[in-house]
Amino acid sequence: GRVGCEPVVCAPIPSTCDLVLPPTGQFCCPTCTNATQLEVVPHDDMRGCHMAGQYFAPGSMWHPYLPPNGFDTCTLCSCHAVTLKVTCPRVDCPPLDCDERVSVRPDKRACCRVCPSSLPQPSQRPPSSRELREEEATDEQIAEEILATGGCKYPVGGPYRNGQEWHPRLYSHGELKCVKCRCKDSKVKCERKRCNKWSCNDECCAAQCKRRRRNIRRHH
């Protein structure tokens, strides 16, 4: 087999932390503690928590490492400074303002889904470092970047970004304005526009409306 190495991903220090202890010795990440814990807990280099054969200092927080996917940044473990109890809750996601069926993940490693409307539009913000890199990247590199963040392949056009909608094109018919496709988490779903009974002025529904009227006349 092959040996693979990954840099340690440090958990964020909570804003309520009274005292941040810098990384020392074998510990790669800073540790959170407070004055009362320093008074209550006697200093002992052997005290701490153990998980998956690893030692964690009292008060430390970390993302668990889950082979073969690496660090699970959507789970935050902690070693209680007094009780030395380990807890590993998942990240709490805020409630969605849209139907969960249309929500998307901003990227494949994102912990929470978001509504498409909450994704920043290019005209509303300055170009990101990724977009600046894309200006200098080749078409192949750009396509790989889009697909790596939940984008979709499609036979004609694309690739399309996660959450993007478009009208598909056929070489023989051009753009199909009555069909809309949507990319969601690397999967494409296409639907024809739904027509109500009397939407005869809509170019996508005119043919159905005429057939419906002929059937009505035929039965009266």
Image (cartoon, rainbow, N blue to C red):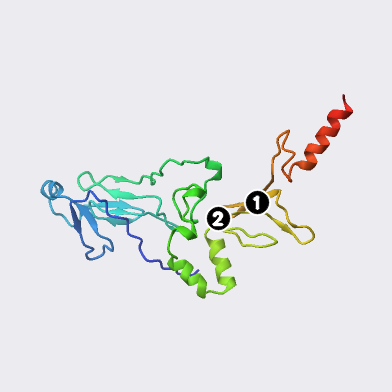
Q: Residues within 10 Å of mark 1 (few under 14, many from 20)?
A: some
Nearer the observer, 190 or 206 = 206
Q: Which residue is mark 1?
A: 181
- Quarter of the picture containing the C terminus is top right
127 left or right, relative to 88: right
Pick whichever, 158 or 194, lies toward us.
Answer: 194
Task: Measure how far apart labels 2 and 1 are at the Cα level.
Answer: 12 Å
- Helix, strand or loop at mark 2: loop
The residue carrying pointer 2 sits among few (fewer than 14), some (14 to 19) or many (20 or more) residues within 10 Å by Cα, namely many
Q: What residue is pinned by disc 2?
A: 162
Q: Residue furthest top?
A: 220
- Is residue 102 shown left or right of residue 171? left
Whether residue 68 is visible to the viewer of this picture, yes or no, is no
Could you tell me which residue is drawn at 84 percent across and 29 percent down?
Answer: 216
Residue 84: x and y in percent read 24, 46
Q: Position of residue 23 (x, y in %)?
A: 23, 63
Mark 1 is on which residue type?
Cys
Number of the front mark, 2 or 1: 1
Looking at the rendering, which quadrant does residue 200 occupy? top right
Which amino acid does the dot numbered 2 rest on?
Answer: Asn
Q: Earlier in the sequence, mark 2 or mark 1?
A: 2
Position of residue 119 measured from the top left corner of the image (x, y, whole percent) = 48, 53
Q: Residue at x 55, y 68 (%)?
A: 142
Please state if 58 lies on the left or on the right of 142 as rendered.
Answer: left
Q: Which residue appears farthest toward the front when viewing the image?
A: 201
Q: Is residue 102 above or below residue 61?
A: above
